[in-house]
Image (spheres, rainbow, N blue to C red):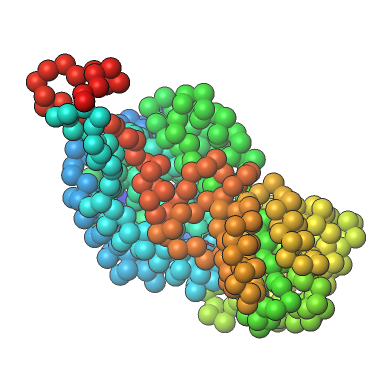
Amino acid sequence: MATDILTGPTLLGTATRTRTYKNFIDGEWVEASTGDTFEDRNPADTRDVVGIFQKSGKADVDAAVDAAKRAFAKWRLVPAPRRAEIVYRAAEMLMERKEEYSRDMTREMGKILKETRGDVQEAIDTAYYMAGEGRRMFGPTTPSELPNKFAMAVRQPLGVCGMITPWNFPMAIPSWKLLPAIVCGNTCVIKPAQDTPLSTFNLARTLSDAGVPRGVINVVSGFGSDVGGPLLEHPDVRAISLTGSTAVGRIVGTTAAKSFKHCSLELGGKNPMIVLDDANLDLAIEGGLWGGFGTTGQRCTATSRIVVQKGIYGEFVERYVDRAKALRVGNGLDETTDMGPAINEAQLKTDLSYVEIGKSEGAKLKCGGNRLEGGEYQYGWFMEPTVFIDVDPKMRIAQEEIFGPVVSIIACEDLEDAIHIANNIEYGLSSSLYTKDVNKAFSAIRDLEAGITYINAPTIGAEVHLPFGGVKATGNGHREGGIGAIDFYSEWKSVYVDYSDRLQRAQIDRPE
Ligand code: UN1
Protein backbone atom coordinates (compact mmCIF):
# COMPACT_ATOMS: atom_id res chain seq x y z
CA MET A 1 0.00 0.00 0.00
CA ALA A 2 1.49 3.33 -1.00
CA THR A 3 2.10 5.83 1.76
CA ASP A 4 0.56 9.26 1.73
CA ILE A 5 3.72 11.18 2.47
CA LEU A 6 7.17 11.56 1.05
CA THR A 7 10.24 12.75 2.83
CA GLY A 8 10.47 16.46 2.23
CA PRO A 9 13.12 19.12 2.66
CA THR A 10 14.13 20.30 6.12
CA LEU A 11 12.48 23.39 7.57
CA LEU A 12 14.86 26.34 7.91
CA GLY A 13 17.81 24.02 8.09
CA THR A 14 16.51 22.55 11.35
CA ALA A 15 15.80 18.92 11.99
CA THR A 16 12.05 19.39 11.47
CA ARG A 17 10.94 17.54 8.36
CA THR A 18 8.26 19.00 6.15
CA ARG A 19 5.83 16.41 4.91
CA THR A 20 5.20 16.08 1.22
CA TYR A 21 1.62 15.03 0.54
CA LYS A 22 0.62 13.09 -2.54
CA ASN A 23 -2.64 13.11 -4.45
CA PHE A 24 -5.30 10.61 -3.43
CA ILE A 25 -6.43 8.77 -6.53
CA ASP A 26 -8.15 5.38 -6.66
CA GLY A 27 -7.36 4.76 -3.01
CA GLU A 28 -3.62 5.26 -3.54
CA TRP A 29 -1.37 8.16 -2.64
CA VAL A 30 0.35 9.14 -5.86
CA GLU A 31 2.68 11.84 -7.09
CA ALA A 32 1.54 14.28 -9.75
CA SER A 33 2.34 13.50 -13.37
CA THR A 34 4.03 16.89 -13.65
CA GLY A 35 6.71 16.08 -11.08
CA ASP A 36 6.03 19.55 -9.64
CA THR A 37 5.04 20.48 -6.10
CA PHE A 38 4.04 23.64 -4.22
CA GLU A 39 4.29 24.77 -0.61
CA ASP A 40 1.46 25.29 1.85
CA ARG A 41 2.78 27.99 4.19
CA ASN A 42 1.42 29.33 7.47
CA PRO A 43 0.02 32.84 6.86
CA ALA A 44 0.82 33.83 10.46
CA ASP A 45 4.47 32.82 10.03
CA THR A 46 5.53 32.19 6.48
CA ARG A 47 8.73 30.50 7.66
CA ASP A 48 6.54 27.58 8.67
CA VAL A 49 5.93 25.22 5.73
CA VAL A 50 2.83 23.25 6.69
CA GLY A 51 3.26 20.78 3.87
CA ILE A 52 4.39 20.30 0.32
CA PHE A 53 1.65 19.34 -2.12
CA GLN A 54 1.45 18.04 -5.65
CA LYS A 55 1.13 20.66 -8.38
CA SER A 56 -1.06 18.50 -10.55
CA GLY A 57 -2.09 18.82 -14.16
CA LYS A 58 -4.65 17.51 -16.63
CA ALA A 59 -3.27 13.94 -16.64
CA ASP A 60 -3.84 13.71 -12.88
CA VAL A 61 -7.40 14.99 -13.26
CA ASP A 62 -7.99 12.43 -16.02
CA ALA A 63 -6.66 9.62 -13.80
CA ALA A 64 -8.87 10.75 -10.91
CA VAL A 65 -11.98 11.01 -13.09
CA ASP A 66 -11.28 7.55 -14.57
CA ALA A 67 -10.96 6.10 -11.07
CA ALA A 68 -14.16 7.83 -9.98
CA LYS A 69 -15.96 6.55 -13.05
CA ARG A 70 -14.90 2.96 -12.37
CA ALA A 71 -15.82 3.25 -8.70
CA PHE A 72 -19.25 4.63 -9.60
CA ALA A 73 -20.25 1.34 -11.26
CA LYS A 74 -20.20 -0.37 -7.83
CA TRP A 75 -20.83 2.50 -5.41
CA ARG A 76 -24.15 3.46 -6.99
CA LEU A 77 -25.44 -0.05 -6.18
CA VAL A 78 -24.48 0.05 -2.49
CA PRO A 79 -27.73 0.71 -0.59
CA ALA A 80 -27.88 4.32 0.58
CA PRO A 81 -28.21 3.38 4.29
CA ARG A 82 -24.96 1.37 3.97
CA ARG A 83 -23.21 4.27 2.27
CA ALA A 84 -24.45 6.52 5.04
CA GLU A 85 -23.12 4.23 7.77
CA ILE A 86 -19.61 4.85 6.50
CA VAL A 87 -20.24 8.60 6.69
CA TYR A 88 -21.51 8.16 10.26
CA ARG A 89 -18.32 6.31 11.14
CA ALA A 90 -16.30 9.16 9.62
CA ALA A 91 -18.16 11.61 11.88
CA GLU A 92 -17.11 9.61 14.93
CA MET A 93 -13.50 9.52 13.75
CA LEU A 94 -13.50 13.26 13.05
CA MET A 95 -14.64 13.81 16.63
CA GLU A 96 -11.57 11.95 17.83
CA ARG A 97 -9.27 13.83 15.47
CA LYS A 98 -10.89 17.24 15.96
CA GLU A 99 -8.11 18.90 17.92
CA GLU A 100 -5.33 17.68 15.63
CA TYR A 101 -7.18 18.74 12.49
CA SER A 102 -8.12 22.13 14.01
CA ARG A 103 -4.46 22.83 14.73
CA ASP A 104 -3.47 21.79 11.22
CA MET A 105 -6.12 24.14 9.89
CA THR A 106 -5.04 27.13 11.98
CA ARG A 107 -1.51 26.55 10.74
CA GLU A 108 -2.47 26.47 7.10
CA MET A 109 -5.33 28.96 7.07
CA GLY A 110 -4.60 31.34 9.94
CA LYS A 111 -8.01 31.61 11.60
CA ILE A 112 -8.06 31.22 15.36
CA LEU A 113 -8.36 27.82 17.02
CA LYS A 114 -11.89 28.49 18.28
CA GLU A 115 -12.93 28.94 14.67
CA THR A 116 -11.00 26.03 13.20
CA ARG A 117 -12.58 23.80 15.86
CA GLY A 118 -15.88 25.18 14.57
CA ASP A 119 -14.87 24.39 11.00
CA VAL A 120 -14.08 20.74 11.83
CA GLN A 121 -17.31 20.60 13.88
CA GLU A 122 -19.22 21.83 10.82
CA ALA A 123 -17.86 18.82 8.90
CA ILE A 124 -18.87 16.55 11.80
CA ASP A 125 -22.37 18.05 11.87
CA THR A 126 -22.66 17.61 8.12
CA ALA A 127 -21.54 13.98 8.41
CA TYR A 128 -24.13 13.16 11.08
CA TYR A 129 -26.86 14.94 9.14
CA MET A 130 -26.00 13.32 5.81
CA ALA A 131 -25.66 9.91 7.48
CA GLY A 132 -29.31 10.33 8.49
CA GLU A 133 -30.27 11.23 4.94
CA GLY A 134 -29.12 7.80 3.82
CA ARG A 135 -32.29 6.38 5.38
CA ARG A 136 -34.52 9.12 3.98
CA MET A 137 -33.69 10.43 0.52
CA PHE A 138 -37.44 10.73 0.20
CA GLY A 139 -39.21 10.91 -3.13
CA PRO A 140 -42.92 11.23 -3.84
CA THR A 141 -45.27 8.34 -4.39
CA THR A 142 -48.44 9.62 -5.88
CA PRO A 143 -51.67 8.26 -7.38
CA SER A 144 -51.69 7.57 -11.09
CA GLU A 145 -54.50 9.03 -13.22
CA LEU A 146 -55.11 5.47 -14.52
CA PRO A 147 -56.43 2.44 -12.61
CA ASN A 148 -54.07 -0.38 -11.61
CA LYS A 149 -51.05 1.75 -12.14
CA PHE A 150 -48.46 2.86 -9.59
CA ALA A 151 -46.47 6.12 -9.77
CA MET A 152 -43.44 7.30 -7.85
CA ALA A 153 -40.19 9.20 -8.27
CA VAL A 154 -36.84 7.96 -6.96
CA ARG A 155 -33.55 9.75 -6.51
CA GLN A 156 -30.63 8.50 -8.56
CA PRO A 157 -26.99 9.55 -8.44
CA LEU A 158 -25.50 11.64 -11.24
CA GLY A 159 -22.12 9.95 -11.65
CA VAL A 160 -18.75 11.64 -11.23
CA CYS A 161 -19.00 15.00 -9.43
CA GLY A 162 -16.26 17.64 -9.57
CA MET A 163 -15.72 20.00 -6.65
CA ILE A 164 -13.69 23.17 -6.38
CA THR A 165 -13.41 24.52 -2.85
CA PRO A 166 -12.10 27.71 -1.20
CA TRP A 167 -9.54 28.28 1.53
CA ASN A 168 -11.70 30.01 4.12
CA PHE A 169 -13.58 26.89 5.33
CA PRO A 170 -11.07 24.24 4.30
CA MET A 171 -12.87 21.27 5.85
CA ALA A 172 -16.46 22.43 6.30
CA ILE A 173 -17.04 23.38 2.67
CA PRO A 174 -15.50 20.20 1.20
CA SER A 175 -17.75 18.27 3.62
CA TRP A 176 -20.85 20.14 2.37
CA LYS A 177 -20.07 18.81 -1.09
CA LEU A 178 -18.44 15.39 -0.61
CA LEU A 179 -20.79 13.97 2.01
CA PRO A 180 -24.17 14.50 0.34
CA ALA A 181 -22.60 13.47 -2.96
CA ILE A 182 -21.43 10.09 -1.71
CA VAL A 183 -24.55 9.40 0.34
CA CYS A 184 -26.51 9.88 -2.90
CA GLY A 185 -24.25 7.31 -4.61
CA ASN A 186 -21.98 9.60 -6.63
CA THR A 187 -18.20 9.47 -6.80
CA CYS A 188 -16.05 12.58 -6.51
CA VAL A 189 -12.95 14.41 -7.62
CA ILE A 190 -12.15 17.40 -5.44
CA LYS A 191 -9.64 20.16 -5.97
CA PRO A 192 -8.95 21.93 -2.68
CA ALA A 193 -7.77 25.56 -2.62
CA GLN A 194 -4.01 25.73 -3.08
CA ASP A 195 -3.69 27.76 0.15
CA THR A 196 -5.30 25.08 2.33
CA PRO A 197 -5.06 21.58 0.86
CA LEU A 198 -4.14 19.83 4.13
CA SER A 199 -7.60 20.09 5.71
CA THR A 200 -9.20 18.47 2.66
CA PHE A 201 -6.60 15.70 2.77
CA ASN A 202 -7.40 15.20 6.47
CA LEU A 203 -11.09 14.86 5.61
CA ALA A 204 -10.42 12.48 2.71
CA ARG A 205 -8.09 10.38 4.85
CA THR A 206 -10.75 10.08 7.54
CA LEU A 207 -13.40 9.06 5.01
CA SER A 208 -11.06 6.45 3.61
CA ASP A 209 -10.22 5.18 7.13
CA ALA A 210 -13.95 4.98 7.84
CA GLY A 211 -14.39 2.64 4.88
CA VAL A 212 -15.20 4.72 1.78
CA PRO A 213 -14.06 2.38 -1.02
CA ARG A 214 -11.21 3.23 -3.37
CA GLY A 215 -12.01 5.66 -6.16
CA VAL A 216 -15.17 7.02 -4.53
CA ILE A 217 -13.32 10.12 -3.31
CA ASN A 218 -10.26 11.42 -5.14
CA VAL A 219 -8.27 14.50 -4.17
CA VAL A 220 -6.11 16.32 -6.71
CA SER A 221 -4.19 19.33 -5.44
CA GLY A 222 -2.93 22.19 -7.55
CA PHE A 223 -3.94 25.46 -9.13
CA GLY A 224 -7.17 26.62 -10.73
CA SER A 225 -6.16 26.64 -14.37
CA ASP A 226 -4.15 23.39 -14.13
CA VAL A 227 -6.66 21.30 -12.18
CA GLY A 228 -9.98 23.17 -11.93
CA GLY A 229 -10.04 23.86 -15.67
CA PRO A 230 -9.57 20.24 -16.83
CA LEU A 231 -12.07 19.06 -14.19
CA LEU A 232 -14.63 21.53 -15.46
CA GLU A 233 -14.06 20.54 -19.08
CA HIS A 234 -13.96 16.77 -18.55
CA PRO A 235 -16.78 15.05 -20.47
CA ASP A 236 -17.22 12.34 -17.82
CA VAL A 237 -17.82 14.83 -15.01
CA ARG A 238 -21.58 15.22 -14.66
CA ALA A 239 -21.75 17.89 -11.95
CA ILE A 240 -19.57 20.74 -10.78
CA SER A 241 -19.87 22.46 -7.44
CA LEU A 242 -17.90 25.61 -6.78
CA THR A 243 -17.60 27.86 -3.77
CA GLY A 244 -15.61 30.92 -4.77
CA SER A 245 -15.77 34.42 -6.13
CA THR A 246 -18.50 35.72 -8.42
CA ALA A 247 -15.90 36.29 -11.15
CA VAL A 248 -14.75 32.65 -11.08
CA GLY A 249 -18.38 31.52 -10.77
CA ARG A 250 -19.23 33.27 -14.01
CA ILE A 251 -16.49 31.33 -15.86
CA VAL A 252 -17.38 28.02 -14.21
CA GLY A 253 -21.10 28.48 -14.87
CA THR A 254 -20.71 29.32 -18.55
CA THR A 255 -18.14 26.55 -19.14
CA ALA A 256 -20.25 23.93 -17.38
CA ALA A 257 -23.30 24.97 -19.40
CA LYS A 258 -21.61 23.94 -22.67
CA SER A 259 -21.60 20.28 -21.67
CA PHE A 260 -24.88 20.52 -19.69
CA LYS A 261 -23.17 19.71 -16.42
CA HIS A 262 -25.22 20.28 -13.31
CA CYS A 263 -23.59 23.27 -11.71
CA SER A 264 -23.91 24.68 -8.21
CA LEU A 265 -22.31 28.05 -7.52
CA GLU A 266 -21.90 29.61 -4.09
CA LEU A 267 -20.29 32.98 -4.65
CA GLY A 268 -19.67 36.42 -3.21
CA GLY A 269 -21.47 38.41 -0.57
CA LYS A 270 -21.61 41.93 0.83
CA ASN A 271 -23.78 41.21 3.79
CA PRO A 272 -25.69 43.96 5.58
CA MET A 273 -26.47 44.05 9.27
CA ILE A 274 -29.19 46.58 10.06
CA VAL A 275 -29.33 48.07 13.55
CA LEU A 276 -32.53 49.98 14.39
CA ASP A 277 -32.95 52.57 17.15
CA ASP A 278 -34.78 50.10 19.40
CA ALA A 279 -32.07 47.39 19.15
CA ASN A 280 -30.23 45.93 22.12
CA LEU A 281 -27.06 47.90 21.46
CA ASP A 282 -24.70 45.68 23.46
CA LEU A 283 -25.88 42.67 21.50
CA ALA A 284 -25.61 44.47 18.15
CA ILE A 285 -22.06 45.63 18.87
CA GLU A 286 -21.02 42.15 19.93
CA GLY A 287 -22.64 40.64 16.85
CA GLY A 288 -21.16 43.22 14.48
CA LEU A 289 -17.66 42.56 15.78
CA TRP A 290 -18.00 38.80 15.45
CA GLY A 291 -19.62 39.08 12.01
CA GLY A 292 -17.17 41.70 10.74
CA PHE A 293 -13.85 40.48 12.09
CA GLY A 294 -14.42 36.77 12.72
CA THR A 295 -12.29 34.75 10.26
CA THR A 296 -10.52 38.10 9.58
CA GLY A 297 -13.59 39.09 7.55
CA GLN A 298 -12.83 36.22 5.15
CA ARG A 299 -16.28 34.68 5.01
CA CYS A 300 -18.68 35.01 2.13
CA THR A 301 -21.21 35.63 4.90
CA ALA A 302 -19.07 38.30 6.66
CA THR A 303 -20.87 41.32 8.10
CA SER A 304 -19.14 43.79 5.82
CA ARG A 305 -21.82 46.52 5.91
CA ILE A 306 -23.46 47.78 9.08
CA VAL A 307 -26.47 49.98 8.44
CA VAL A 308 -27.35 51.94 11.58
CA GLN A 309 -30.43 54.09 12.24
CA LYS A 310 -29.61 57.72 12.92
CA GLY A 311 -30.95 57.83 16.52
CA ILE A 312 -28.21 55.49 17.77
CA TYR A 313 -25.65 56.01 15.00
CA GLY A 314 -23.22 58.11 17.07
CA GLU A 315 -23.23 55.82 20.07
CA PHE A 316 -22.99 52.67 17.96
CA VAL A 317 -20.02 53.98 15.99
CA GLU A 318 -18.12 55.11 19.05
CA ARG A 319 -18.58 51.89 20.96
CA TYR A 320 -18.07 49.62 17.94
CA VAL A 321 -14.83 51.34 16.97
CA ASP A 322 -13.50 51.21 20.56
CA ARG A 323 -14.13 47.48 20.63
CA ALA A 324 -12.61 46.93 17.16
CA LYS A 325 -9.43 48.73 18.25
CA ALA A 326 -9.18 46.44 21.27
CA LEU A 327 -9.27 43.19 19.28
CA ARG A 328 -6.08 41.22 19.65
CA VAL A 329 -4.56 40.37 16.29
CA GLY A 330 -2.03 37.55 16.17
CA ASN A 331 -1.23 33.93 15.56
CA GLY A 332 -4.42 31.87 15.75
CA LEU A 333 -2.65 29.10 17.68
CA ASP A 334 -2.48 31.48 20.66
CA GLU A 335 -5.78 31.07 22.51
CA THR A 336 -5.84 34.77 23.44
CA THR A 337 -5.91 35.92 19.81
CA ASP A 338 -9.18 37.40 18.50
CA MET A 339 -8.24 37.75 14.84
CA GLY A 340 -5.67 35.96 12.69
CA PRO A 341 -3.87 37.07 9.52
CA ALA A 342 -5.07 37.39 5.93
CA ILE A 343 -4.66 34.16 4.01
CA ASN A 344 -1.83 35.37 1.78
CA GLU A 345 0.01 38.38 0.47
CA ALA A 346 -2.34 38.97 -2.44
CA GLN A 347 -5.38 39.06 -0.15
CA LEU A 348 -3.61 41.43 2.25
CA LYS A 349 -2.77 43.72 -0.67
CA THR A 350 -6.39 43.68 -1.78
CA ASP A 351 -7.54 44.54 1.75
CA LEU A 352 -5.07 47.43 1.97
CA SER A 353 -5.98 48.66 -1.50
CA TYR A 354 -9.60 48.98 -0.38
CA VAL A 355 -8.44 51.20 2.49
CA GLU A 356 -7.02 53.58 -0.12
CA ILE A 357 -10.16 53.26 -2.24
CA GLY A 358 -12.35 54.09 0.78
CA LYS A 359 -10.25 57.12 1.69
CA SER A 360 -10.24 58.40 -1.87
CA GLU A 361 -14.02 57.99 -2.06
CA GLY A 362 -14.40 60.24 0.99
CA ALA A 363 -15.39 57.68 3.64
CA LYS A 364 -14.02 58.39 7.14
CA LEU A 365 -11.39 55.88 8.27
CA LYS A 366 -12.22 55.57 11.97
CA CYS A 367 -9.76 52.85 12.93
CA GLY A 368 -7.20 50.49 11.46
CA GLY A 369 -6.22 50.57 7.82
CA ASN A 370 -2.61 49.51 8.29
CA ARG A 371 -0.58 46.40 7.88
CA LEU A 372 0.83 45.13 11.19
CA GLU A 373 4.57 44.64 10.99
CA GLY A 374 7.54 43.82 13.22
CA GLY A 375 7.68 41.67 16.34
CA GLU A 376 5.16 38.84 16.29
CA TYR A 377 3.81 40.15 12.98
CA GLN A 378 7.12 40.11 11.15
CA TYR A 379 6.55 36.95 9.13
CA GLY A 380 2.78 37.09 8.66
CA TRP A 381 0.06 38.78 6.60
CA PHE A 382 -1.49 40.77 9.43
CA MET A 383 -3.69 43.84 9.27
CA GLU A 384 -5.52 46.00 11.80
CA PRO A 385 -9.28 45.64 12.15
CA THR A 386 -10.51 48.48 9.96
CA VAL A 387 -13.71 50.52 10.22
CA PHE A 388 -14.95 53.15 7.81
CA ILE A 389 -17.85 55.33 8.94
CA ASP A 390 -20.20 57.73 7.15
CA VAL A 391 -19.94 55.47 4.14
CA ASP A 392 -22.15 56.27 1.19
CA PRO A 393 -23.91 53.06 0.11
CA LYS A 394 -22.79 53.63 -3.49
CA MET A 395 -19.08 53.71 -2.65
CA ARG A 396 -16.98 50.80 -3.85
CA ILE A 397 -16.10 49.83 -0.25
CA ALA A 398 -19.84 49.40 0.34
CA GLN A 399 -20.55 47.56 -2.91
CA GLU A 400 -17.62 45.23 -3.55
CA GLU A 401 -16.67 42.08 -1.69
CA ILE A 402 -13.31 42.79 -0.01
CA PHE A 403 -12.93 39.49 1.91
CA GLY A 404 -10.90 41.12 4.66
CA PRO A 405 -11.26 42.89 8.03
CA VAL A 406 -12.75 46.05 6.58
CA VAL A 407 -16.23 47.08 7.78
CA SER A 408 -18.30 49.92 6.32
CA ILE A 409 -20.79 51.67 8.58
CA ILE A 410 -23.65 53.41 6.80
CA ALA A 411 -26.30 55.65 8.38
CA CYS A 412 -30.00 55.14 7.59
CA GLU A 413 -33.27 56.97 8.30
CA ASP A 414 -35.55 54.05 9.10
CA LEU A 415 -36.20 50.40 8.23
CA GLU A 416 -37.45 51.20 4.75
CA ASP A 417 -34.31 53.18 3.97
CA ALA A 418 -32.15 50.43 5.49
CA ILE A 419 -33.75 47.74 3.35
CA HIS A 420 -33.28 49.88 0.27
CA ILE A 421 -29.57 50.25 1.11
CA ALA A 422 -29.27 46.54 1.94
CA ASN A 423 -30.82 45.43 -1.35
CA ASN A 424 -29.19 47.95 -3.63
CA ILE A 425 -26.25 45.69 -4.42
CA GLU A 426 -25.37 42.88 -6.82
CA TYR A 427 -25.02 40.24 -4.08
CA GLY A 428 -27.60 38.53 -1.89
CA LEU A 429 -26.13 35.94 0.47
CA SER A 430 -26.75 36.83 4.11
CA SER A 431 -28.43 39.70 5.95
CA SER A 432 -29.39 40.62 9.47
CA LEU A 433 -31.59 42.93 11.50
CA TYR A 434 -31.34 44.00 15.14
CA THR A 435 -34.66 45.16 16.56
CA LYS A 436 -37.11 44.32 19.34
CA ASP A 437 -40.09 45.05 17.09
CA VAL A 438 -41.54 41.81 15.78
CA ASN A 439 -43.48 43.58 13.02
CA LYS A 440 -40.30 45.13 11.67
CA ALA A 441 -38.49 41.81 11.97
CA PHE A 442 -41.05 39.98 9.88
CA SER A 443 -41.21 42.72 7.21
CA ALA A 444 -37.42 42.54 6.91
CA ILE A 445 -37.49 38.74 6.64
CA ARG A 446 -39.88 39.18 3.72
CA ASP A 447 -38.12 42.09 2.03
CA LEU A 448 -34.37 41.55 2.38
CA GLU A 449 -33.04 40.15 -0.90
CA ALA A 450 -30.81 37.42 0.48
CA GLY A 451 -30.67 33.66 0.90
CA ILE A 452 -30.30 34.02 4.67
CA THR A 453 -31.73 36.53 7.17
CA TYR A 454 -30.82 36.60 10.86
CA ILE A 455 -32.81 38.47 13.48
CA ASN A 456 -30.76 39.71 16.44
CA ALA A 457 -27.67 37.83 15.29
CA PRO A 458 -24.93 38.78 12.81
CA THR A 459 -24.76 37.55 9.21
CA ILE A 460 -22.44 34.59 9.89
CA GLY A 461 -23.05 31.24 11.53
CA ALA A 462 -25.31 29.18 9.30
CA GLU A 463 -26.21 25.70 10.53
CA VAL A 464 -25.67 22.71 8.28
CA HIS A 465 -29.19 21.32 8.11
CA LEU A 466 -30.72 24.47 6.62
CA PRO A 467 -30.38 25.61 3.02
CA PHE A 468 -27.22 27.69 2.46
CA GLY A 469 -26.80 29.96 -0.54
CA GLY A 470 -27.87 33.25 -1.97
CA VAL A 471 -29.74 35.19 -4.61
CA LYS A 472 -28.65 37.51 -7.43
CA ALA A 473 -24.88 37.39 -8.16
CA THR A 474 -24.29 35.15 -5.13
CA GLY A 475 -25.31 31.98 -6.93
CA ASN A 476 -27.35 30.18 -9.54
CA GLY A 477 -30.27 29.05 -7.44
CA HIS A 478 -28.88 25.91 -5.82
CA ARG A 479 -28.47 25.48 -2.09
CA GLU A 480 -25.94 23.59 -0.03
CA GLY A 481 -26.73 22.20 3.42
CA GLY A 482 -29.77 20.18 4.33
CA ILE A 483 -32.03 18.73 1.70
CA GLY A 484 -30.84 21.28 -0.88
CA ALA A 485 -27.58 19.34 -1.15
CA ILE A 486 -29.43 16.05 -1.65
CA ASP A 487 -31.44 17.76 -4.38
CA PHE A 488 -28.26 18.84 -6.15
CA TYR A 489 -26.47 15.50 -5.94
CA SER A 490 -29.42 13.40 -7.08
CA GLU A 491 -31.54 13.29 -10.15
CA TRP A 492 -35.20 12.32 -10.28
CA LYS A 493 -36.35 9.25 -12.08
CA SER A 494 -40.10 8.93 -12.39
CA VAL A 495 -41.31 5.34 -12.32
CA TYR A 496 -44.68 4.03 -13.54
CA VAL A 497 -45.70 0.42 -12.91
CA ASP A 498 -48.78 -0.63 -14.84
CA TYR A 499 -50.32 -3.78 -13.40
CA SER A 500 -53.58 -3.64 -15.40
CA ASP A 501 -52.33 -6.09 -18.06
CA ARG A 502 -53.62 -3.89 -20.87
CA LEU A 503 -52.48 -0.85 -22.78
CA GLN A 504 -53.50 2.26 -20.87
CA ARG A 505 -52.79 5.58 -22.56
CA ALA A 506 -52.18 8.53 -20.28
CA GLN A 507 -54.27 11.59 -21.13
CA ILE A 508 -56.25 9.57 -23.76
CA ASP A 509 -57.93 6.72 -21.88
CA ARG A 510 -60.05 8.41 -19.28
CA PRO A 511 -61.89 5.84 -17.19
CA GLU A 512 -65.22 6.97 -15.69
C1 UN1 B 1 -18.40 30.80 3.62
O1 UN1 B 1 -17.92 31.82 4.08
O2 UN1 B 1 -18.19 30.47 2.42
O3 UN1 B 1 -22.43 30.66 7.90
C2 UN1 B 1 -19.15 29.81 4.41
C3 UN1 B 1 -21.22 30.75 8.09
C4 UN1 B 1 -20.39 29.50 8.02
C5 UN1 B 1 -20.08 29.15 6.60
C6 UN1 B 1 -19.50 30.27 5.80
N1 UN1 B 1 -21.11 28.42 8.65
O4 UN1 B 1 -20.68 31.83 8.31
* Residue drawn at x 52%, y 42% as measured from the top left: 477
Residue 253: where, in percent of width, then height?
55, 34
* Residue drawn at x 60%, y 40% as measured from the top left: 248
| Residue situated furthest front in the rendering | 512
Displayed quadrant of residue 223 = top right
State which quarter of the image contains the C terminus.
top left
Residue 383: where, in percent of width, then height?
71, 67
Displayed quadrant of residue 363 = bottom right
Residue 169: where, in percent of width, then height?
50, 58
The answer to which of 137 and 419 lies nearer the viewer is 419
Q: Is residue 69 visible?
A: yes
The answer to which of 238 and 150 lies nearer the viewer is 150
Q: Is residue 501 above or below residue 416?
A: above
Q: Is residue 289 above or below residue 266?
A: below
* Residue drawn at x 82%, y 54% as measured from the top left: 395
User: In screen coordinates, is 500 left or right of 219?
Assistant: left
User: In screen coordinates, is 82 left or right of 434?
Assistant: left
Q: Is residue 56 visible?
A: no
* Residue drawn at x 74%, y 56% as measured from the top left: 420
Residue 488: where, in percent of width, then height?
40, 42
The answer to which of 160 and 380 lies nearer the viewer is 160
| Residue situated furthest left in the rendering | 501
Total marks shown come to 0
The answer to which of 375 and 370 lies nearer the viewer is 370
